[in-house]
Image (tube, helix red, strand yellow):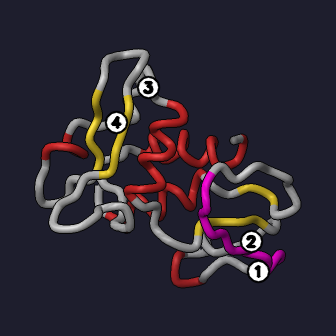
Amino acid sequence: MNRRFWTWAIGMVAIWPAATARAEPLNYQMVTVGDVGNAPDPATGGLYGAVAYEYRIGKYDVTIGQYAAFLNAVAKTDAYGLYNTSMGTNLNIAGISRSGSPGSYAYSVMTNGGSSANRPITFVSWFDAARFANWMHNG
């Protein structure tokens, strides 16, 4: 999955009212989108750009390190398939290795010519992004 789609997916599922109290399980910088009443963009045929309520969205791409922390918190059994084996085998963009067996999986950031922790995560689906956003919102 390319970075633009990942950022879009997180943006689409990681929006919640700015006033909502939530626990942030890791350091992930958010920004407020607050131009309530903003009209839709005419260039999109009036379909996109309107802001009906204030919300918060991730400022940057989700990193490999952040996604590894998420996996370690919620994917000991990986019942939802949040880890894609290509995350550990595609040497061009790999970044997370998995060890152990179902029920005791552990995830670690790989070193590919330096730490991969601050590189953007790849090989995630829209549903993976939704689960990450849910975890960010609910802890």
Give, as a single range, the part of the protein colored magenta: 26-37
2 and 1 marks in contact (CB < 8 Å) = yes
Q: Is residue 112 left or right of residue 125?
A: left
Could you tell me which residue is drawn at 62 percent across and 42 percent down? Answer: 135
**Residue on which the image places disc 3:** 80
Q: Amino acid at mark 3?
A: Tyr
- Disc ID at residue 12: none
- Which of the two discs, 4 and 2, labels the residue nearer the N terminus? 2
Crowdedness near tag 2: few (<14), some (14–19) or many (≥20) residues, C-alpha within 10 Å: some
Report which quarter residue 106 is drawn in.
Answer: top left
Could you tell me which residue is drawn at 36 percent across and 38 percent down? Answer: 107
- Disc ID at residue 51: 2
**Residue on which the image places disc 4:** 83
Residue 96 location, x and y as percent?
A: 29, 47
Separation of marks 3 and 4 at Cα, in angstroms: 8 Å
**Is label 4 in a helix, a strand or a loop?**
loop
**Is label 2 in a helix, a strand or a loop?**
loop
Q: Nearer the viewer, residue 54 or 118?
A: 118
The verdict on residue 116 being magenta is: no
- Which of the two discs, 1 and 3, labels the residue nearer the N terminus? 1
Residue 101 location, x and y as percent?
A: 31, 18
**Is label 3 in a helix, a strand or a loop?**
loop
- Which of the two discs, 4 and 1, labels the residue nearer the N terminus? 1
**Which quadrant: the C terminus?**
top right
Residue 30 location, x and y as percent?
A: 66, 69
Separation of marks 4 and 2 at Cα, in angstroms: 34 Å
Q: Nearer the viewer, residue 13 or 89?
A: 89
**Residue on which the image places disc 1:** 38
Q: Amino acid at mark 1?
A: Asn
